[in-house]
Image (cartoon, rainbow, N blue to C red):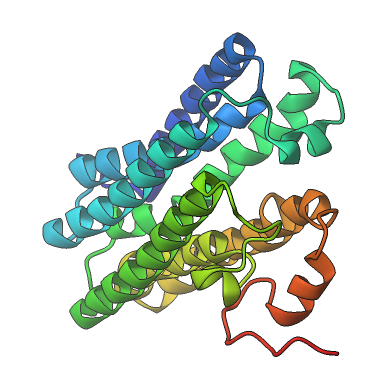
Amino acid sequence: MIESWWGLALVAIGIAVVAMALTAYAAHRAGRFSVIDVTWGLALAVISVVAAAVGTATPWRRWVVALMVVVWGARLSRHIFTRAKGHGEDPRYAELLDGGGQREALTKVYLPQGLAICLLSLPILAAAHWDVVGSWLVWVGVVVWAGGTLFEAVGDAQLAAYKRDPDRPTIMDRGLWGWTRHPNYFGDALLWWGIWIAGGAASGLWPGLVTVLAPVAMTHFVRNVTGAKLLEKTMSQREGWDEYAARVPLFVPRPPRRPTG
C-alpha cells in the first residue's frame, strides 16, 4: 500500500509516461497520431484501478471512483477505436501538426496529453489518499457522472446513426445535436465534474480546491483546445453551417433558436 500522496502521484506519472511511449510506437506503426485518443481513456482507467488497489483511503469510495473512470475510459476508447478503424488521420491532428512528424508530435501531442492525463488523475488520487468526509457528495458525483456519461453516449450513438444514413443532410442537427453542437464533448466535461465531486470534493475542502483543476482543465481542453473549437475549423466549411451555428450553441445545451429570416 502507498500512504504518501507523492507516491501515488509518481505511480500516475509513471503510467502516463509508459502510455505515451506505447502510443508513440503505435502511432508510428499506424501512420497516424489520432491513436492517442484511444490511449487517453485507457491510461486513466489503469491509473484509477492501480490507485484504488494501492491507496489507503476509504475502500468503498476508492473503488466507486475507479469504476466511474473505467466505465468512461473503456466506453470512450472502444468508441474511438471503432470509429477510426479504416480511416486516415483525424483532421484535428492534421491541423495541429501541419505535416510535422514524431518530433513535432512530441511537443504538440504526447507531452501535452501526458501532462493532461496526470492533471486529470488528481481527483482519482484524492479518492485513493484521503478518507471520504462527505458520503453524500460521492453519490451526487455519481449522479452527475451518470448524466454526463449518458449525454456523451447518446450523442455518439446519434452521430453514428447519422453517418449510416445515405440520405443524411449536410449538417447533423438531430437529437442532442439540435441542442448543442458538441454533445459528446459536453458530456465528457460533465462526467469529469462528477468524478471530481466524488473523488475531490468529497475528500474535504483542501483536496477539493486542489483537484478542481482536473474538471476545469478537461472542460477547457474539450471546448477550446483539442475538442470543439479545433473540430469546427473544418466543420465550418460545410454548407449550412452558419445557419446551424446561429441556432445551436457551441457547448452548453439549450433549446435551439428559431431560424431567422
> Residue 94: percent from the left, percent from the top?
78, 32
Residue 63 visible, this orientation: yes
Quadrant location, the C terminus: bottom right
> Residue 207: percent from the left, percent from the top?
41, 68
Please, is residue 164 above or below residue 198 in the view?
Answer: above
Residue at the spot x=21%, y=55% of the render? 62
The one of 17 and 180 positioned closer to us in this rendering: 180
Give the quarter of the image for residue 65: bottom left
The one of 1 and 147 positioned closer to us in this rendering: 147
Residue 8 shown left or right of residue 231 in the figure:
left
Please, is residue 10 above or below residue 198 in the view?
Answer: above
> Residue 98: percent from the left, percent from the top?
87, 30
> Residue 35: percent from the left, percent from the top?
56, 28
Residue at the spot x=40%, y=62% of the render? 154
Which residue extends farthest left? 60
Which residue extends farthest front? 167
Residue 4 shown left or right of residue 224 in the figure:
left
